[in-house]
Structure formats: structure tokens, C-alpha cells
Amino acid sequence: MSDIRITIDRSEVSDWLETLIDGMDEQAGYMVEGVLNVYELVSRYSSPVKTGDLMNSIISEVDGLSGDVIPTIFYAQWVILGRGEVVPVNAKALWWPGLDHPVMRSGPSRPNDFMQTGFDAANSGGEIDNLCDQFLDWCIA
């Protein structure tokens, strides 16, 4: 009867694992940055555009192995969550730069969670899976 014998040199495995562990944070960081960049880009294209200010305010911030994609313009919360009617408090009418003439009220707006829409679109597009696959390929290479 024949047999198969496998011998593994423990030092080779230890060296391979040590190299893998040493590069893990850097490679995972590349993946996190890539994923955030995809989310940022897709969220920009999912945002409503009147002036482009909201779209251009969306940024990604990476901090090690975590990060955020956020719109930085002050009115983003009202676009995402919606808002009620706006009426003047200490004046007879509302006016802001870019408005042709004062108005007595500004009607409510419906919520538009374009950030969630962008997140969902990015996840279904396959690019996030590709970035994760690249990281896993590095892990086993």
C-alpha cells in the first residue's frame, strides 16, 4: 500500500503569516478607501442637483480602517429628512440670495434620502464586491 506524506516547515508558515499580518492594515486601508470613494461618487450622482452645491459637498473621510461619506453643506439634512413649511418670524416675507422676489412662505419638502439611494446603488453595482475580492485575493496570495 502506498501513502502520501506531507511535511510542512513551520518556519515557512510562520514567515508567511507574519508577512500577511504586517501588511494587513495597509491592504485593508486600501480597500476601505476604495469602498468609500465608490460610495462618494455614487452618492454624488444620486443627489438632487439645482445648483450643484449639494453634490459637490459630498466628501469621504478615511481614518485608518473606518471612514465616512458625508454631505457637508448645511441644508443637506433638510433634503435628506424633508422639512415642514417655512414662514417668516420677524419679517413679512422670506428672502434669500438667488430668490427673484420675497415670498410669504416656502412649502414643505418631502424627504429625499439620496445618500441611502447611493449606498444601495453602490452595493448593487459590483464594484464594492470587486474591492473586497481584491483584498481577499491578497490575503491568500
Image (cartoon, grey):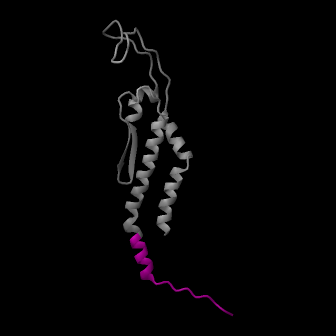
Q: In the rendered structure, which segment of residues is drawn in magenta?
A: 1-19
Residue in front for this viewpoint, 97 or 22:
97
- Residue extending furthest toward the left: 90
**Residue at coordinates 49% horizontally, 55% vertically from top-left?**
131
**Residue at coordinates 45% horizontally, 29% vertically from top-left?**
49
Q: Is residue 4 magenta?
A: yes
Please provide percent x and percent y for residue 38.
46, 46
Looking at the image, is 82 positioned above or below residue 71?
above
Q: Is residue 81 magenta?
A: no
**Residue at coordinates 31% horizontally, 8% vertically from top-left?**
91
Looking at the image, is 25 positioned above or below residue 62?
below
Residue in front for this viewpoint, 51 or 102:
51
Residue in front for this viewpoint, 111 or 125:
125
Q: How many marks?
A: 0
- Residue extending furthest toward the bottom: 1
- Residue extending furthest toward the right: 1
Please provide percent x and percent y for residue 28.
42, 58
In the picture, measured across the screen, residue 3 lies left or right of residue 130, that is: right
Looking at the image, is 78 positioned above or below residue 42?
above
Please provide percent x and percent y for residue 95.
34, 13
Work out which quarter of the rendered image holds the N terminus and state it: bottom right
Please provide percent x and percent y for residue 138.
47, 65
Looking at the image, is 109 positioned above or below residue 70?
above
**Residue at coordinates 48% horizontally, 41% vertically from top-left?**
42
